[in-house]
Amino acid sequence: MTIQLAERKRWNAEHQRLTALLKNPRGYEQAVELFLSQHAWLYVSKMADVDAAAKLSTLEDELLDGIREETLRQYPVKAPDTTNSIVWHLWHIARIEDMTVNVLIGGQEQIFAEGDWLSKLRIACAHTGNGMTEEEAAELSAGIDIDALLDYRIEVGRRTREIVRSMEPAEMKRKVPAAGIDKLRAQNAVKPDAEWLLEYWGKKTFAGLILMPATRHNFLHLNKAIRIKQRIQKKS
């Protein structure tokens, strides 16, 4: 299974259209539908609604198709823009989407906390992964429960879709509440030397978080992960 460059370019073009629609209250319904389509393409097919899933061949489907466990876990990797394992990238994007959409937009608890995912994932950290030491990244890559990680990703994706569907047009222009940032800080959502991330989120609107990280951040990391897979499995 290979998703051609043209499909990635099409996703990028549609993301630019999503950016424009989110700025226009009259385009709100179109924006939500486009978001749901773009977001679904960043997850395994079964994450989205059944009817949509039947029609999808997604970016994460491509990543997981034929991948070996040792490929998923290999750390460090030799890539121009990362040394982190594929499982690190999947965990990182799930954690960030969980935090930003549930706490900052939804004003509710993270799925990670609600479902005892720290134990299920068999990891020692609950932060985003920014600023991890090599030892920490190696430990996570070797020990994380892959099935649980994929299940967690699906739960995060489905909750995001519920929250975006429930939003009102005027909410898109709302600034991220300081209380949400304070809550994440109290939960040690980022490591001390990654405090810049909370400051970055704090300057966003809800629409800004939907664009980055809820869509583009996933897109960028999945593309990195696919390139890592191709490098490793081509050699072997």
Image (cartoon, rainbow, N blue to C red):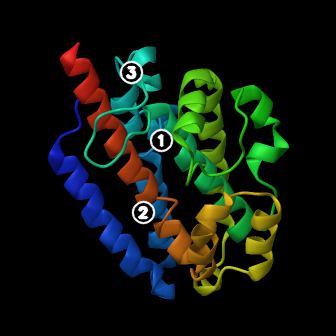
Which quadrant of the figure has residue 187? bottom right
Mark 3 belongs to which amino acid? Thr
Residue 93 placement (x, y as % from top left): 53, 49
Q: Distance between the residues labelled 1 and 3?
A: 13 Å
Amino acid type, label 1: His
The quarter of the picture where residue 155 lies is top right
The residue that appears at 39% across and 21% down in the rendered structure is 71
Q: Circle 3 is placed at which residue position? A: 71
SS state under label 1: helix
Q: How many labels does the image show?
A: 3
Residue under label 1: 89
The amino acid on which the numbered mark 2 sits, given as a three-letter code, is Leu
Residue carrying label 2: 34
Mark 2 vs mark 3: which is more N-terminal? Answer: 2
Vertical relation: 191 (above or below) 226: below
Q: Residue at image x 56%, y 22%? A: 142
52 in relation to 131, above or below: above
Which mark sits nearer the N-terminus, 1 or 2? 2
Q: Where is residue 212 in the image (x, y as percent from the top left)?
A: 48, 66
Task: Please indicate, yes or no, whether residue 163 appears anywhere in the rendered image.
Answer: no
Q: Residue at x 65, y 81 (%)?
A: 171
| Mark 2: secondary structure | helix
Q: Is mark 3 on a helix, strand or loop?
A: helix
Closer to viewer: mark 2 or mark 3: 3
Q: Quadrant of the N terminus?
A: top left
Q: Which of marks 1 and 2 is in front?
A: 1
